[in-house]
Amino acid sequence: MPSFDVVSRTDLAEVDNALNGVEREIKQRFDLANTKCAVVRSDDTLTMTADDNMKMEQVKELLRRYLAQRKVELGALEFGEPQDAAGGSLRAVVNIKQGIDGDLGRKISKEVKSAKMKVQLSIQGNELRVSGKKRDDLQAVIAFIKDMKNKQPLQFVNFRD
């Protein structure tokens, strides 16, 4: 029985490469050089620090630009509000979404079932498994899920015939 998995994964190696580019540009730019501006990754979170709101916006735009160049989907990032940090600087936390959360999984499952497609969906941890009798049915489900316009980037992997 053909099946595939719907996942949401962010390549953390590409995120690290983008952060290296951001760090290099922060050191070179005259308006950001010799400031407290930095972006640091630990697990699935990025911590941005800056001297003031204007510099925080500059660092955020640099981060977005370098991530886009590295083909990391910006929908996978959840930017937090800047908060006061030590020494009069600002700190903002950016969460990197990994996996499909329960709400999104239920939403996708409900939409596919309401479309009366001849497939079975099962939520397996932070992934969705879609299986059906025909390959064409699975391809129709992929097209349907892409048309749903979810904010979180989704990948379709592990296609088995």
Image (cartoon, rainbow, N blue to C red):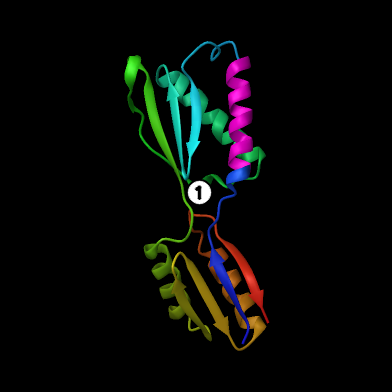
- Which residue has dot 1 on it? 76
Q: Position of residue 8 (x, y in %)?
A: 53, 58
Magenta-drawn stretch, dominant element (helix, strand or loop) = helix
On the rendered image, what quadrant is the N terminus found in?
bottom right
**At 38% across and 27% down in the image, what residue appears?**
91
Drawn side of residue 87 relative to residue 3, left or right: left
Q: Secondary structure beneath disc 1?
A: helix
Q: Is residue 64 magenta?
A: no
On the rendered image, what quadrant is the C terminus found in?
bottom right
**Foreground of the two, 81 or 14:** 14
**At 50% across and 36% down in the image, what residue appears?**
41
Residue type for callout 1: Ala
Image mark count: 1
Image vertical order of residue 107 relative to residue 137, above or below: above
**Foreground of the two, 89 or 16:** 16
Image vertical order of residue 38 relative to residue 67, above or below: above
Image vertical order of residue 20 relative to residue 161, above or below: above
Drawn side of residue 125 relative to residue 2, left or right: left
**At 44% across and 19% down in the image, what residue appears?**
54
Quadrant of res 102? bottom left
Q: Is residue 24 magenta?
A: yes
Quadrant of res 103? bottom left
**Foreground of the two, 85 or 78:** 85
Quadrant of res 143? bottom right
Q: Position of residue 142 (x, y in %)?
A: 59, 71
Dot 1: within a 10 Å radius of its alpha carbon, few (fewer than 14), some, or many (20 or more) residues? many
Image vertical order of residue 119 relative to residue 38, above or below: below
Q: Which residues lie in the magenta part?
A: 14-28
**At 58% across and 33% down in the image, what residue appears?**
19
Q: Position of residue 58 (x, y in %)?
A: 51, 23
